[in-house]
Each structure stands twice: as structure tokens, then as C-alpha cells.
Amino acid sequence: MRVILILISWLLAFGGVSNGLSANASSRPKIVSVGAILALDSTIGKVAKIAIEEAVKDVNANSSVLSGTTLVVDIRNTNCSGFLGLIEALRFMETESVAVIGPQSSVVAHTILHVASELQTPFLSFAATDPTLSSLQFPYFIRTTMSDLYQMTAVSEIVYHYGWKEVTVIFLDDDYGRNGLAALDDALAARRCRVSYKVGIPPGDISRSEVMDILVKVALMESRVIVIHANHAAGILVFNVAHYLGMMGDGYVWIATDWLASALDYEFLPIITDTLQGVLVLRQHTPGSEKKRSFLARWNKLTEGRYGLSSYALCAYDTVWLLAQALDSFFDQGGVISFSNHTNSQSSAGSGLNLGAMSRFDGGLHLLKNILDSDFVGLTGPIKFSSGKSLIFPAYEILNIIGRSLHRIGYWSNYSGLSTVAPESLYSRPQNRSSAKLQRGVIWPGESVKTPRGWVFPNSGKQLRIGVPIRVGYREFVSQVPGTNNFKGFCIDVFMAAVDLLPYAVPYQFVPFGDGRKNPNYNELVKKITTGEFDGAVGDIAIVTNRTKIVDFTQPYAASGLVVVAPVRRSNTGAWAFLRPFSLQMWAVSAAFFLFIGIVVWILEHRTNDEFRGPPRQQLITILWFSLSTLFFAHRENTVSTLGRVVLLIWLFVVLIINSSYTASLTSILTVQQLHSSIKGVESLKEGDEPIGYQVGSFAEHYLNDTIGIPSWRLKPLGSPEEYAKALQLGPGNGGVSAVVDERPYIELFLSSQCRFRIIGSEFTKSGWGFAFPRDSPLSIDLSTAILTLSENGELQRIHDKWLTQSTCGSDNTELESDRLHLDSFLGLYLLCGLACLIALLIYFCSIISKFRRASSNGYASDGQGSLRSGHLRTLLSIIDEKSDPSKRESKRRKLEGSSLSESSRRMHL
């Protein structure tokens, strides 16, 4: 660094530039100078130089831009060297250069852009795509091309579109390559994909043997999706060596960033060989236009077909026009070109460096604003900057190299994502990234038309380490063969059968997990997958929420769920068996409704029905007798009133349902053997305080404690079916448990030989068993497909029948449910009947109140307020108790009918 500083001091001291540069007298000078920093020995630099020179000619020939002023561009060569780039940038500070086109290289840009910020000189780069060249860090840096941030987003969406999860990245090990890799890593992570392996290529000259060593390591990796982010020389060498090693064959995917597109545009035919067949290439998208086609014809004539027109050449051409129009606006707004001494140079006094020669462009901020406010259409399309100082609507073409041509399979844009139509046709529509698609017919390496899987098992000879629990109980599911690391059982056979269905070989070895004295903790088994100790886990592993957060499971191969098992005893019918069909609450509510209906019918029938009248004792007996006799439809009393008949009709329907249900339940109790348990389900376990058993290592402990809220002191670990049976037989009073909570497959196997216990209620959780693998592992997807195939062809059931014996306890091995009928089953009927009674009573009392008001309006007189109240009460009671004579109503009806007939006869005579 000291050598660089001494060299800079020498340049500034002897550059022959005066310390003060005076402003031109005129606001529009005759000549305006602009610098350009290019790598003239690169493919981009060669075409950019031609494009810049042609753009300068066009600007100077156009009288509408910079009228009266000649634009001069001084092009300097950096040879992609940051040191030379810094020197050339400082040399431009010795001249009246108001802006610099470049630098072309991202590496050079990182070196010299600090100069731009200090001296307030805009730098416009058409090729520095490094996403870390931020406008916040370098405010005077304007990128007139697309950032690699967008290109890497496009690559990640291609990877996601084809369903690949991991990629290998070969990158140029400099600022350009490393920062592009970082952007790709972030973009992939946003789509739950990742860079599984990355390897850098040293910048500069690299030998074929070095590239071969790199690619040999890549070939040993699992991922077959390879992204190459390099330069022309290194990238073409990588493809040549990859073809030699057979890495351009079937199963591989190669994605090249736009370095390859610029190389193909520069010299297409010499590059296109068998080494590039099937490669996907990204190229910056420039919309077609008449202006672009005209310039292309001019380019071919100018270069005589030696060089192709790349997107970077178009960007370089537009950069000159962008700067020219910004300068034109600058002069129109009264701007003048003037320079002043660098104010911070005096702080370096005494350092031995002559920094006083460095000058600052006074109008730099004004010119920068005009550049960012530009809005015109160039060869590359609309030239307009967003608030982040980036070009709007970045877009790429996605190309497939087939034979000697480039086949476009789609586009990517930051606005619409992947699409098969040009992005500019979508900008006028509402933004929609949900329908991402590319054209079919892609030819992959090896001339394959089938989309590659994107991964294989590594060729390193390393086997997958599959963790398998060493179970103490229920060894029918998983058990270790004594003296070996081999395992057998239902779960093992399912896994091996599924692996046999995979279209590729899976090298694996079983690794025991557990001490063999008790069942291991399955949560710890799953966690070892995340730490890398195991590559997967096979066994009776329940798929539960906390495990799915850290690993991926296959399709469940066995249904599961927590159930309650408890001791049962055969119920003796006994002398009071007739009371068992209904619960106590049901009996009480039914009795209350019988009495209620009797009272309601009595109220409705008392005034009109002689059978509901008489002495109070007789009426009470009538109410009781009527309500009870409806149970057998044996009531002798006829209902006369309409309201009474409606209530009775609804009540008899309710009685019919109750009778039928009672009869069916009692018949079942008396004729079918009944099993009884004091445990009614998980809710009764929660409400009690008796100990509950669970299997060691199962997730049942976590569920009972954390989810249901049963305290830990009530939970008792049990390790085998024998311990289950012993604890249940002893009971809670003798050191045992009242019930055991475990997964259904274990309980079904336990009950196949233990007929004294039954499942109480139904499953209160739903889950399944699956095989566990790391997140985003392709094995979990392929094995899921294989498990579905096993289920469809019946092999899964055959494996089940082989290991899990059928029940030997007869046909009564069923879930034990409560045999009583509860109020909940009849609540709707009772509500309907009660509502009908209330409505009938409401109508009845409304008619009574109406009669009472008419009676009161007949001029009832009394002495004193107390006598008036007692008189009203006696009147109301007399109306309720009085006998309504039906014959009077009948004679009144006939009288009305007779008068109606007389009126009709009179009208006929008239």
C-alpha cells in the first residue's frame, strides 16, 4: 500500500496540472471531456470500445443534444487491474473530465469508487454487476446495466421451478464472483433451496490441471445442478474439462450466468461445440425495436462480422447517450464546468504526498441528479432509474444451447418472474408471479429431454448413516439382530421395500441408537439428524409438530394416534338393570317433563274439558295420571282445546322416540355381554388425580403434560407390554396406574394377547409413522412416492400381516364406549316440546287477559283501593276457573250462520 501511495504522489506532483482550474466563461463549452476505463483485452471491453466510439459520433452528429458542444471520450485500458484502474482514475482527475464511463470490472470498481465519492465525479458503469456496489456506499456510482442481485434471483427461480433443492456453484474467486455467490445463496435460501458446495477459481491464468482438480471434487458431490459464475477464459476452460471428465452427460444440469452469453454474442461459432450442449444460459434482455435493428445492421457492417453485438455493447452505447442528455440538461439549467481543490488534501500535509493536485468537480452533484432523472428509450429499452438508483424492469432471457443455436425457453423479470412471453408485454398488466413457467422441450446435457433429478448419491463411497432405535418392548416393530448392526421388524421391512422401488441405488448402513436397557428418546434421535450425526432415521417415529419443524418426514406408512387403554369388567345385569339405559340426568329431566306436560295440558283444558275439572284432589290425581299414562299411550282423557291437542301431539312424538331408544338400549344390556370401566376417556383422566402410564421415549409424555395439562407427578413411564399389563392389573391403589395412554399400533398389538383391557373412547390425536431425513432432502420425496406404491400394490398390507399378529381375544376386542343414553342425545326434542308448551301457554293467557279486561270494563265498583284489588283478583281467578260452555259457542255459531243465510235470501229476492 505504501508503494501505491508513493506512486500516486509522484503522478500528482509531476502530472503537469495546475492546482486551480478556472471555469469556462461560457456555460456551454466547446468541448466537454469524459473519461472511460475499460479492459480492452476482454470480450466486453473490445465491443464496448466500438460501441462508445459510435455513440460519441452519433451524439456529436445530433444537433438536438449538446448543441454547440463536442463530446470527447478519453478511453484508458486497465487490463482488469485494480491498481491500474486507480492510477487511470487519478489521471482523469488531472484533466477536466466531468464524468467517467466505467469501470468495466467490478474488482476495479471496488478500488477506485472511493475516489469518485471524494472528488464528486459520476462514474457510470455498463458492466460492473457486483451487487455490493451499493449506491449508499458509493453515491456517485451509477450502474447502467443490471445488477447480479437480479440475475441470481433469476437463477434461484429457475432452480425452484424445476424442483431442485441443492446446487453446486463454481465461481471466480474475486469480488465479482464472491459477491455474486452471496447473492445467489440468499436468493436460494428464500425458496428453501441452498448451495450445497461451492468452489472458487483463482482469478488470472489457471491451468487445465487445476480446473480438473476442482471438477473432480464437484463430481464427488451429491448435487448435479452446477451454476458457473466466472469470466470468458475460465468459464470456457471449465466446460472443456467437464466434457473431458464426462460431466456434460445425462443427469447433469449446467447453468451459466450472462458471462457466457456475452462470449457467445462476441464470437458465436468458434465457441459452440459439443462441450456446451444442453447448457442453460442467462442473457440480459433488450426489447426488440427498429432502432436496435438498424444499429445491428450498422454494427455488422462496421465490424465486418468479426464481433457479435452483445448486451453489454448496447449498454455502453446507451451510457454515452445517457451522459450526453444529462450534460445537455446540466447546461440548460445554467450549470458550468468548474473544479476546485480537494478540501481534505490539506489534512495530508506532512505526509510526503502531493495531494493538492487533486481537484473536485463543483457541478458533480448537479450532474448526478440529472443522470438519475433521465427518462428516454435507448437501444436496450427504457432508460429510467428507480429510487434505489437501479434501472427499472430488469429482465433476462433464458437460453438453451441446442446444436449450433440458442433456443430461448423463457424470460425472467423482476416484475413478472418466469414467463414465456416478453416482459415488456406484461408491464401494463397487474403484477402476477404465481404462474411462473418456461417452455417445454429443453434439451439437457446428454441430449436428454427428461428433466434431470438434480442429485445423486455422492461417489465418495460413503454410506448414509441411518439411525434406528433399539427398542426394549414391542420388538415386532423394530429389533436388533443380536451381535450385529442389522435390524428387523415391520418398520425395517417397509423401509427396505421402499428403497428397492427407488430408480437408483441408495448405499446405507443402520446405526443403533439407544442403550438397549430402555426405549430411547425419539426426540433425541430426530435431533441427531439436524446435527449431522445421522443422515436419516428409520423406525416407529411419530410425525408430530415439534419434529416436523427440524426435519422432513416421508409419507406416513402407518396410521397412528393416542388412545386410552384401561381395565374393564363384565357388567352384571342385576335387579336394577332397567335403570341403566338412561343416565341420571336423563331420568330426572324426563320425569320433570312428564309432570310439566301434565300441568300444561291441565291448564289448557281446565276451562273447556269436564275431565280436567273437579275437586282439587281429583284434579291433582288427573294431572299425575294423565302425564304418566302418556308414556304408554294409555291416557283416557280426551283433549278438547286446539292448544291442548297441539301440545299433546308433540309430546307423544317425543315419548315415541324415548320409548324406542329405551327399549333398544335395555335389550342390548340384557342380551349382549357388557364391559364396564370407570374410565370414560381422556377427559375423565384429566379431571382425576390417579397415575397414568405412558411408554418410555414416546411423545405421549409431552402431549399429556404440555398439551392436556396433566401434571408430571401423575405420569408413570412403562417400558414393555408386560409392564403395561402389570401396572393396569395392580391399579392406582397398589402402585399401578388407572390407564395407559399410548399410540394405537402399540395398543392394538398389546390387546391382541391381553383380553382384560380395552381401548376407552376413540383416538384423541391423529398422526402417523414416517421416516425422517434432513430438511429438503430429496430422499424424503422419493421414498414417499415409493411408500404410496407399496400401499397401492398391497405390499404394505402384506408386511403388516407378517409382523403384527391378529387379535386372539375374539370379536369383543373393540373400543369401549358408554352404554347409557345421555340427555345430549334428546336435548333437541325436549327443547322443541318445551318451546311448544310455552307458546301455547302464552296464547292461552293472552285470551284470559282479554276476557279479564272485558269483565273489568263492565263497571265493577268497589269501596276502597284494597277491595278493588281483591275484586280484580277474584275476577281473574273466576275467569280461569269458570266452565266455558261449548253449547253456547255452538248456538252462537248457528245463529251467525242463520243470519248469514237470511241476508243471502233477501238479496236473491231483490
Image (spheres, grey):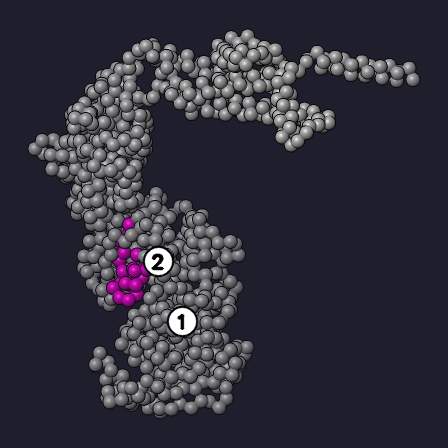
Examine the image and state in which quarter residue 390 appears: bottom left
Residue at 38%, 73% in the rendered image: 139
**SS class, disc 1:** strand
Residue 411 image position (x, y, % from top left) = 43, 54
Q: Could you tell which of marks 2 and 1 lies nearer the N-terminus? A: 1
Residue at 37%, 15% in the rendered image: 579
Furthest residue to the front? Answer: 863
Q: Looking at the image, is 88 positioned above or below residue 157? A: below
Q: How many marks?
A: 2
Callout 1 amino acid:
Ile
Q: Which residues are magenta?
A: 166-185
Q: Of residues 78 and 718, which is closer to you in this image?
A: 718
Asked whether residue 510 is drawn in magenta, I would say: no
- The residue that disc 1 covers is 142
- The residue that disc 2 covers is 152
Residue 423 image position (x, y, % from top left) = 47, 56
Q: Of residues 449 and 673, which is closer to you in this image?
A: 673
Q: Looking at the image, is 696 positioned above or below residue 586? A: below
Asked whether residue 184 is drawn in magenta, I would say: yes
